[in-house]
Amino acid sequence: MKPNDNLVNLHIGCGTHLKEGYSNIDQYVYASGVIQMDIFNLSFESDSVDEIFTEHMLEHIGKFEVPLALKEWARVLKPDGKLVMNLPNLEWCMQQWLAKPEDERWGWQLDTIFGLQTHSGEFHKTGFTAPRLQQLLKAAGFHNITISNYWSHAQSCFWVEASKGYFTSAVKCLASIVVPWWDHSELLELWEQNLQYLPDTEIIFIDNGSALKGKTALEKFCRRQKIKLLRNETNRGFAAANNQGANVATGEYIIHLNNDVEIKKSPIEYLCNLAGEGLAGPLAQNELGEFYLEGWALCIKRYLLEALEGWCEDYGPGYWDDVDLSHRARLAGYSLTPVPDVNSLIHHITNATGRDGRIDQLALHFQNRKTFIRKYYNCYPKIIVDGVFFQLYRTGIARVWYSLLEEWAQNGLAKHIVVLDRAGTAPKILGIRYRTIAAYNYGTTDADREMLQQVCDEEGANLFISTYYTTPLSTPSVFMAYDMIPEVVGANLDEPMWKEKHHAIRHASAYIAISENTASDLTKFFPEIPPKSVTVAQCGVQSLFSPASQEHIKGFKNKYGISKPYFISVGGGADYKNSILFFKAFAQLASKQGFEIVCTGSGVLLEGELRNYTLGTVVHKLQLNDEELRLAYAGALALVYPSKYEGFGLPVLEALSCGCPVITCPNASIPEVAGEAALYVNDQDVEGFADALCEVQKPKVRNSLIAAGLEQSKKFSWSKMAETVSSALIDATLVPLNLQEINLIVFPDWTQPEESLGLELERVVRAIATHPHKSKMTLLVDNSNISDEDANLALSSVAMNLLMEEDLDVSDGPEISLIGQLSEIQWLALIPRIYGRIVLENENTEAIVQAKAQNIPTFEPESFIQESH
């Protein structure tokens, strides 16, 4: 296709708005003067177009389509050609939307984010910020990029201009080999062999401060082999050396190799084909659970390395720089392709490049891991979950935590969570970040606490919660109470497990209990715990646990040789489970030979005891998976659960959900779970339990229990528990604010002159400090744009002035707390607990909008006392 004049200018996505002097192109519009053409496959030769112009078009294609379109446009533009775009500023649009009151958000402000939506072509599928545009354009091969603000379509937009240009050095070959080097002249013999597989290839060595002998040997070798040699006086590190080599490379791809690799066959075409538009290399996983491509044999498209701004040099001599590069590439949407059976192509002999004897390698590894975490996982607040229970046991508590993590992976809390995986024992859930640590040992609890504190420090953790009683040294923690069985039954509390439990209780700043009864027992045995600091989060039940068809039940019974009606007992081994009550009652049944018993879960009665009460009856002791357990419940006459104490009673809820009647005792948390949907018997009443075994077989009673149980089970869900626990965890991150019954907030403008700022703060503090309920108050002071140190200095000056000039001692109340930096999720938790906002003459209005505090009731300082009454 040839235009009518000498300049070839394209107006892409023109709709019906034709631009004079341009070929007006639209893929979907059929109108006079409009050329229908696939914007991802333009009918123009490479390097043939002078200018491409688009106006409010790019946001209408998907995020995965945008890079394809930009690369196609770069293809057709001349080397000095220009791309001009006008498109919405997503960040501005979202800020405007958030700043509006709720009832004003659903007009045109919503359209700026999502499009007019009058038809499919009007939907916005992609949003852009200036950094994202820079990244996309660089990745597509554009240079000289300018992005300026521009008002269009009644909103803030970007005006973007970019030229195609050339790379710093023109592409002259398929791939350039870049090899950082430090001493180890003995490896030069290996490279004599390697070079036979790299004919006609650009090879660049970077000497990272080798000693004189190694430096001289390397120089001679490179001169003889015509290898380009770059020199550093000191060891600048793996990443810096790779960047130096990349800056002078002329290949379309760059293959980064360690100097200690043995090449077994020609790798260039294979690696380049694998990398495609992304990266290829040996796949690995580090202790954070991050998959990455190792840097000792990594192939990357040169323009992509440039778009990613090269290797990150924050990691010094080495370690974690390849993790960083892989992470950034993944975030930018590029594929990481593992090299299958990489050792048959290139063999990594040892880590000689990094073995600079002057460097503490282990210390460097830990330091760089911390750097990586701070850069990419600093999602505030950060909560550490120690998955220790998965290492120790596989009982109901494991089910609780697996379910919580699954829910958090779905509801967004996962971005604030790091699960500590003890020796690889934690279940892997997509969306959850893991960090592998050493297995737990009750014999080394002090060392374990030190290790946990180190992890918390490296991660920048705000809060810690353990699945089973572990604690760090100083990071605030939340204690999860499952039951108080050892305390209730009088167990030996000097056992290591219970000593750790009590240590964890005393270390905690907030508490979660899985039932009202457990919460009550916790505060009974530890009266120093304020009841208001305990959140009750009742367990849920998996959707798997539901009524089953007779066909499936029959298959289960056939599999395990169950031929008669049966009762099921789950997890009845411990004394407090009181299973003996059921067996004594069962022995009294005149027709006991007409029944069988299924026992499943941890612990069963001793064979001798069982035989005393079940002579002539078949007892099946089974280990069942969840699907089989569901069928076992659904096919049973009843779950028999005569427990004397439960923290919650998960088997009761599972049975109810499967349409299985329950016979139990009205103890501890069981009535919370079963409600009116169970037959209750005193935990020592053998005859009463025997009567219940008969009663549950009556069709009217049975059907009533099944219907009531199914209805009762609807009150419980893992999503509800996950929401309650996540709210409790976020609330626990607010504990340092010292919230009380009456919480007030101010948003000072810290940029105003010191004198006027001091007078404003004095007015506020005086008003509250003279209030009759000052001891029940906390004044929250926003300091989002000033350091804690400077804010505290200003407040101390205010307190001193009031004491000296008015004899008003604010140490008697109220509490005064700096808010510091809070995330959106923390503000959402804090706002409902704020009684009012004290209005100042000079306020930080931006902070008020960001905190969404516009709708908090407001008070003038002087009138606060009267209005409060």
Image (cartoon, helix red, strand yellow):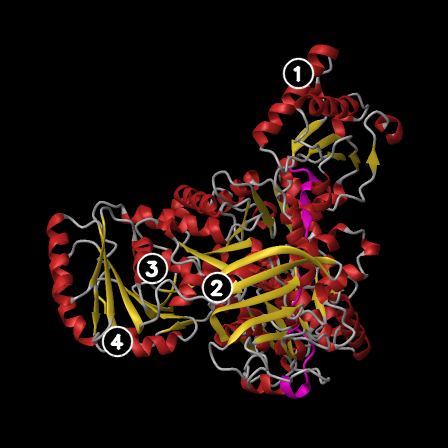
**Horizontal and vertical percent for residue 54?**
63, 70
Instruction: Check disc 4: other Cα within 10 Å, few if <14, some if 14-19, many if 20+.
Output: some
Which amino acid type corresponds to the residue marked 2 in the rendered image?
Answer: Lys
**Horizontal and vertical percent for residue 273?**
37, 78
Which amino acid type corresponds to the residue marked 1 in the rendered image?
Answer: Met
Badge 3 marks a residue whose secondary structure is helix
**Pointer 1 residue:** 800
Instruction: Verify CB contact (< 8 Å) between mark 1 and mark 3.
Output: no
- Work out whether residue 423 can be spotted: no
Which amino acid type corresponds to the residue marked 4 in the rendered image?
Answer: Leu
Span shown in magenta:
529-553
Between circles 1 and 3, the one closer to the viewer is: 3
**Pointer 4 residue:** 345
Q: Nearer the viewer, residue 270 or 702?
A: 270
The quadrant of the image that shows the C terminus is top right
The quadrant of the image that shows the N terminus is bottom right
